[in-house]
Image (tube, rainbow, N blue to C red):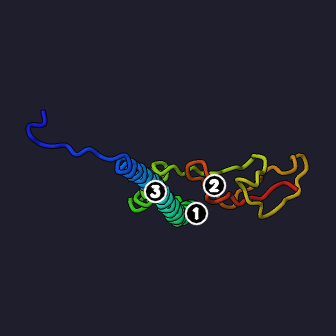
Amino acid sequence: MNKGKKVKQLSKKELESFEKEIKECKKLKDEYLAGWQRTKADFLNYQKQGDKRIETLLSSVKIEWILKMLEIHDNLERAKIHIPKKLEGADWVKGVLQIENQFHGFFKENGVQKIDPEGEQFDPNFHEAVGQIEMKGKEQGIIVEVLEKGYMLNNRVIKPAKVKIVK
């Protein structure tokens, strides 16, 4: 099998030296592997944190943007109340009302829900009391007037309803 090649026999000392070297190499390999695995885990955690920060930022921007749109929508609703009866059938009024319908569709698509709590019990999680009215025959804390509608985005209050309640 050797076909003329001589195989050098290792001395016991040389064999022990190689075995020691192999053990050290295995130990280093394990250390490097563990270090690489820790670094990979740290990087994945960093990546997840970065994704979470971006998601939070985008959510904040979306809320701010929707609040600005709601402000315009609420003003449009207030203006609609004051359209003279004789102009209700005018084309330009119909056009303005169509814009209001587009707002409603946009808000619905984006998970915006209106908080219109008249007649409900006051809840500080959804309402902001800006006044109190004394009324006999009405339970204390009942909302009797909504000054500004509130809004929720994906079941999270982004603007509480401003209300007057029974004292």
Of the image marks 3 and 1, the number of the one nearer the N terminus: 3
Q: Mark 3 and 1 residues: CB-CB less than 8 Å, in contact?
A: no
Question: Pointer 3: what residue?
Answer: 35
Residue lying at 49% horizontally and 48% vertically, measured from the top left: 108
Q: Which label sits on residue 78? A: 1
Q: Residues within 10 Å of mark 3 (few under 14, many from 20)?
A: few
Three-letter amino acid code of the residue under disc 2:
Val
User: Which of labels 3 and 1 is toward the front?
Assistant: 3
Of the image marks 2 and 3, the number of the one nearer the N terminus: 3
Q: Point out the image quarter for the C terminus.
A: bottom right
Instruction: Report the number of discs.
Output: 3
How far is the residue under mark 2 from the one under mark 3? 45 Å
Residue lying at 13% horizontally and 37% vertically, measured from the top left: 2
- Residue 153 as seen in the image, left or right of residue 23: right
Three-letter amino acid code of the residue under disc 3:
Gly
Q: Mark 1 and 2 residues: CB-CB less than 8 Å, in contact?
A: no
Q: Residues within 10 Å of mark 1 (few under 14, many from 20)?
A: few
User: Which of labels 2 and 3 is toward the front?
Assistant: 3
Q: Position of residue 125 (x, y in %)?
A: 72, 53
How far is the residue under mark 3 from the one under mark 1? 64 Å
- Residue 51 as seen in the image, left or right of residue 14: right
Q: Position of residue 56 (x, y in %)?
A: 52, 60
In this rendering, does residue 101 appear at all?
A: no
Question: Pointer 2: what residue?
Answer: 157
Residue that protrudes farthest toward the right in the picture? 136
In this rendering, does residue 18 appear at all?
A: yes
Residue lying at 67% horizontally and 58% vertically, measured from the top left: 160
